[in-house]
Image (cartoon, rainbow, N blue to C red):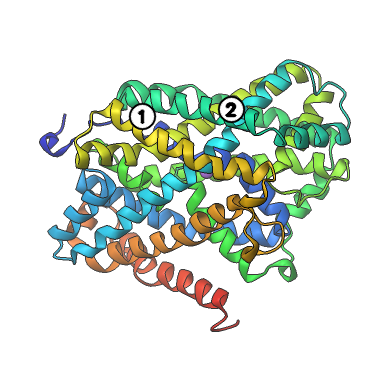
Amino acid sequence: MSANHKDIVHGQWSNRFAYILAATGAAVGLGNIWKFPYIMGENGGGAFVLVYLLCIAIIGIPVMIAEVYVGKKGRQSPMRAVAKVAKENNAHPLWQSFGAMGVLAGYLILSFYAVIAGWAFAYVFKAAGGSFVDASPEYLSDTFALFLTSPVQLICWTSVILLITVIVVAKGLQNGLEKATRFMMPGMLFLLLVIVVYSGFYGEFAHTVEFMFAPDFSKLTINSVLTALGHSFFTLSLASGVMLMYGAYLPEQTSIVKTSIWIAIADTLVALLAGLAIFPIVFANQLEPSAGPGLIFQTLPLAFGQMPAGRVIGTLFFVMLVFAAFTSAIALIESSVAWLVERRGYKRPQAAVLAGFGLWSLSLLTVFSFTGESWALVSFMGEGKTLFDLLDYLTANIMLPIGGLLIALFAGWKVHSNSFETELALAPVTYAVLRVLLKFVTPLIIILVFVNLIGLVKF
Ligand code: PHE
Ligand code: NA
């Protein structure tokens, strides 16, 4: 244990590798495999992908570095960590609000994340039971639509996901979080590669590569840019309390910069592989790239239904997807739990149960959005929009970018250079670049996107 372990309320990762696994586990999840493909499809492909990649490189990585740094200096749950670092740097206590907003965003995200993870769980059994074998695209989209008409099923699967999440988190840092992450990442990557190879042989691979990597800027609206920006935060688990929290558990000698870059690369790789796995099937079967949240549940089963050993591969794939979702769900609940422990004096298990119960109630908003309950529609967002769409937009497109903006401003302008520079141990030029990115580039881009969105200025 390090010298300042007295400050550490909740424990510490056993080593650098454990941290990388957990943080990569938090990053890689439904965002990569479920969300990225369908929002890429909805936003026209290549140009969206390009903006997304740029956001990861020039905004996501610097913000991650800043967040982990603040978490590590603060060594507590997000709000208190930021408050502590603000105080040390003579910054206004109000800065801690971005810690609070992150925790809230994480909580709201988990309320719908758990529902989607529940779909993946249900699909494990559909795959294992052989219901995809030689199935037609129509059959599979009917299966999915039928699944969504049953609130009872959705609520049960969501409950299972939340229950397991609560149990893992209640067991504490090293027993729960680390163990859950250790074996899932390599398995996930391997199965994705298998599907990409299959899609390469039997799907429209060339068309997919063009769709994903030949940018057509006429398809890019300001809302697509905001979605790409928001997703770069979502996919790296930024501005949601998670990296502040995981940074708080960081062992003393771990390089924040190297680990952040590695996590971003791994996350991006999984997202791109997911795109390369799914779109060849979409194009080969004349499916709609813009099918929305159901996309992977209607396309991947087609491949599993036809490939050799597809039943086994399909089952394993959805098992892995559930695991990937769990390692993110755990991250999403962790900061609320830590907050309840610190602030309200609950024991970890009590805090986990309490947080889980609140999430379960909130998750009903998403469940009834998909089952088509009319009260779950929000007319002001446009026709057919639901409370799920609202939660998704509010968190990923509004709260996370604003949180990211505040973190960048805080780290760029308020944190004293010397301690930041020493901690990061970068070459002076690299450090200067990072500082410029945090001070000017990130805030400017985020503000411009919002200003443009509101329509004050058009470019
Ligand atoms: N990064 C996760 C994913 O891509 C989602 C997530 C967001 C996890 C925010 C934690 C915090 O699936
Ligand atoms: Na991700």
Q: Which image quadrant: the C terminus?
A: bottom right
Residue pictured at 28% horizontal, 48% vertical: 78
Vertically, is 177 above or below 250? Answer: above
Tell me the SS state at disc 1.
Answer: helix
State the image quarter where residue 45 is shown: bottom right
- Residue at numbered disc 1: 353
Residue 71 rendering spot, x and y as whole percentages? 27, 47
17 vs 246, nearest the viewer: 246
Residue 66 appears in view: no
**Residue type at the position of mark 2:** Trp
- Residue at numbered disc 2: 157
**Residue type at the position of mark 1:** Val
State the image quarter where residue 295 is shown: top right
Sequence order check, earlier mark of 1 and 2: 2
Q: Which image quadrant: the N terminus?
A: top left
Q: Determine whether label 1 and label 2 are within 8 Å by CB.
A: no
Vertically, is 427 above or below 92? Answer: above
Residue 67 rendering spot, x and y as whole percentages? 33, 52
Residue 220 rendering spot, x and y as whole percentages? 68, 67
Residue 349 appears in view: yes
Residue pictured at 42% horizontal, 45% vertical: 107
Tell me the SS state at disc 2.
Answer: helix
Vertically, is 80 above or below 397? Answer: above
Residue neighbourhood size for the residue with mark 2, other residues' Cα within 10 Å, grouped as few (<14), some (14–19), many (≥20): many
Residue pictured at 24% horizontal, 45% vertical: 72
Residue 88 rendering spot, x and y as whole percentages? 13, 58
Which residue extends farthest bottom?
A: 457
Q: Which mark is residue 19?
A: none
141 vs 67, nearest the viewer: 141
Vertically, is 293 above or below 97? Answer: above
Residue pictured at 83% horizontal, 33% vertical: 201
